[in-house]
Image (spheres, helix red, strand yellow):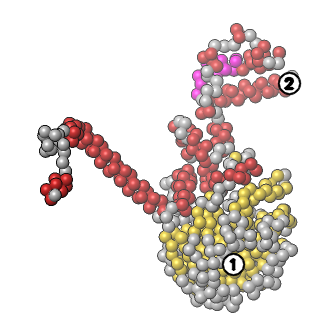
Amino acid sequence: MEFERQESNLVFNDLANSSETNRFSSNSITEDLELSKLVLDCNHKKGILSSCSSKQLPPNDVLSNVWRSIIDLPPALISEILNCLDPKELGVVSCVSTILHNIAAEHRVWKEFYCERWGLPTAARFSDEKSWKELFVEREYRSKTFLGRYSIDVLYGHTEAVRTVFLLASAKLIFTAGYDSVVRMWDMEEGLSIATSRPLGCTIRAVAADTKLLIAGGTDGFIHCWKVVEGLKHLFDLKGVDKQNTEFRLWEHEGPITSLALDLTRLYSGSWDMTVRVWNRSTLKCTQILRHGDWVWSLVPHDTTVASTSGSDVYVWETNSGTLLSVIHNVHVGYTYSLARSRTGDFLFTGGEDGAVHMFEIITESKEHRVVQVATWIPHSGAVYALAFEFPWLVSASGDGKLSLIDVRKLLRASRRSLGKRVLGVKESDQNAIEPPQRMLHGFGCNLFSVDIGADRIVCGGEEGVVRTWNFSQALEIEQRARALRGIRLENRMRRRRLQIEMNGKGGRSDRCSVAAKKNPVNGDRNNSVWHSKRSIESKVKT
C-alpha cells in the first residue's frame, strides 16, 4: 500500500514538473492533478481504468492539455529518443517541424556519426561556422566521388617493385617503400617527390605513419623510426641532415617484418617469426608478444584489441593482457594475406590467396567475442595482397593487376543500442542479394602489392616499380557540369520541339493545299488528268 502511495506521489510530482516546463496555467495543473488522482484511485480500488464510470471523468478539453506531441516531452527524453535514430531517420525527423529541425540539427549525435565513420576531421576540414550535421552531410556527399571521373598520376622514382604504400591524408603526404630499400615521401596534391631516405640495407615491406612518428619495417627484423621535426613543413627528415636524434631503430623480431600499425599509445609489428609485438610509444619497450602458429601477414588494431592473420587463420587479441579473444580457422583457401577494419572496430575484412574478400562482424556479448561472417565477394582471379577501408568504400589490390571498389553501405543494418554504439549486420537470407563490386580499375601490370584510400584519393604500388594515384577530388564538380550541360541540351531540344509544333499549327492550311495539289495536279494533262514525270516525257521524245 505504501509503495503504491509513493508511486502515486512520484507521478504527481513528475506531472507537476512537466506542466511547469510546458507553461500550463495554474488551473490546468490542478485539473491534471485531479485527473491523475482519479485514475490512480480507480486503479487502486478495482485494478483497471475501465471500471471507472465515464461520468466521473473530466471533459475532453482537460484531456487535451495532457501530453499532446513529442515536443511536450522533457528535453532530456527527446535527446534520448533522437539518440536511437540513424542519420537518415534523424534527417526525416528534422523535416517534421521547425522546432524538431532545430533540435535535430544541433544534436550531439551528428558528431558521433561523423567520428564513427571517418574520425575527427582535420583542421583544414573543420570550421567553427559549420555544425556537425553540415560536416556530416558534406562528407557523406563527398563519399560518392569514387563513382565519378578521375585523373591518374604516375609517380616515378623507385627502381624496383613497390611493396607498401601509406597515405597520410591529414598532412597530404604519401610514403612508399619496396625492394630498393629506401623510403620515399611524396606530395599528395602535386605528385612530386619530397625526400628519399638513405638505403636501409634490406627490403622494406611495411610503412606506417601519423603526425608524430614514421616507421618502416625491414626484412632484417628491425623497425626504423623517424620522429617529427618541429617546424619542418613535411614533418619528417628522412635524410637525417637536420637533427640526428630524430632517427632510431627497434630490434627484437627474429624474422622479416611484414606489417606495422600505430595508435595514440602503442606501436604494433607483425613478422614471419610468427609473433605480433606490442610496443609502448613513450618508452619504446615491447609490452606484449602474441604468438601464432604460422607466418604473420597482416594486422590491424582498434582500441584495446588487435586482429592479425597467420597462415589461413584470423586472430583477435586483447592487447592489455595478451589473451586470445577469438580465432577463425581456414578463412581462405591458402594464405590470408590482407586485413582491413572499420573505424568502430565492429567489422573486419579479409583478402586471401583464393582471390576472395570476406566481411565479418565482431559481436561482443557479456565479455564474449563472436565473429560472424557477413558477406563474400570474389572479384579477382589472383591473390588479394592488400585491402583498405574508408567508409563506405572497401578497395582491394590483387595479383591480377586490378583494383576493386566495394560499397558496403547497403549491407549495413543500422540500429542504435543503449550504449550509443553502432551495431550493423546482414541477415543470412540476404546473402544472395549481395551486390558485385561497384567499380573495377584496370590497366596495370600484374601483382599489385599494396593499396591505400583517403577521402578522394586511391594510392597503389606493385611490381612495375611505380606508384599510381587516382584523384577523384573533381569528380562531383565534373558530374555537376556534365549534368548542367545535359540540362541545357535538353532545354534547347524542347524549345526547338515547341517551335516546330507552333510552326506546324500555323502552317496547317498550306499543308492541306499541298495534299490537294498532289491529288489534282495543275501542270499535268488537263484532259486525261494524268501526271507525267519529266523522265517519261524525255523517253517518249527520244523514241
Q: Position of residue 183 (x, y in %)?
A: 62, 83
Which range is magenta? Answer: 23-35
| Farthest residue, direction front | 543
- Please name the residue shown 74% across and 16% down the image: 38
**In which quadrant is the N terminus drawn?**
top right
Dot 1 amino acid type? Ala
- Please name the residue shown 79% across and 69% down the image: 333
Dot 2 amino acid type? Glu
Residue 319 appears left or right of 396: right
Q: Give the number of the disc on residue 2.
A: 2
- Give the vertical position of 271 relative to 139 (above or below): below
Residue 228 appears anywhere in the view: no
Q: Compare residues 252 and 297 and report the one nearer the observer.
A: 297
**In which quadrant is the C terminus drawn?**
bottom left
Determine crowd level at label 2: few under 14, some 14-19, many 20+ residues with C-alpha closer than 10 A.
few
- Please name the residue shown 71% across and 50% down the image: 430
Determine crowd level at label 1: few under 14, some 14-19, many 20+ residues with C-alpha closer than 10 A.
many
Mark 1 falls on what kind of element? strand
Residue placed under numbered mark 1 in the picture: 206
- Give the vertical position of 401 relative to 89 (above or below): below
Q: Position of residue 386 (x, y in %)?
A: 68, 72
Cα separation, mark 1 vs mark 2, equals 70 Å
Q: Is residue 25 magenta?
A: yes
